Image (tube, helix red, strand yellow):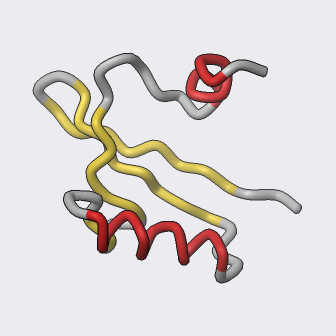
Amino acid sequence: MTTGDFFDELGLQDGDRPIMVNGMVALDDWDGVVDAFFLLLNGETEFTLRVNRGSSNIDLHYEIVP
């Protein structure tokens, strides 16, 4: 699997800009990115990633299945 394939599987498109995880963790600085990373490490299994796509924001929903 290539990086492009992985992003396609996630529903991301060229130009998408991730801006928030689960409606609470803003990805506008390194602190937010680190907070989002720790959500993954602490066992969260459902996520909503808000991305800016063009002139609007959309939510992408994910469930991590062990």
Residue at image position (22%, 39%) is 57
* Relative to 62, 13 lies left or right: left
Residue 36 locus on image (x, y percent): 45, 68
> In this figure, what is the number of numbered marks?
0
Above-or-below relation of 44 to 22 = below
| Residue 29, image x, y percentages | 22, 62
Relative placement, left or right, of 41 versus 15 is right
Seen in the picture, residue 25 relative to 63 is either above or below; the reply is: below
Q: Position of residue 45 (x, y in %)?
A: 68, 68
Query: Which x, y percent locates residue 23?
Result: 32, 66
Comparing 44 with 38, the one in front is 38
**In the picture, residue 16 is in which quadrant?**
top left
Horizontal relation, residue 21 to residue 42: left or right: left
For the point 31% across and 58% down, which residue is it? 20
Quadrant in the rendering for residue 24? bottom left
Q: Quadrant of the C terminus?
A: bottom right
Quadrant for the N terminus, please.
Answer: top right
Q: Quadrant of residue 56?
A: top left
Q: Residue at x 55, y 75 (%)?
A: 39
In this view, the residue farthest toward the bottom is 42
User: Can you name the residue that lies furthest to the left here?
Assistant: 55
Give the vertical position of 31 relative to 1 (above or below): below
Question: Looking at the image, which residue is at 66% across and 19% down?
Answer: 5
Most distant residue in the front direction: 30
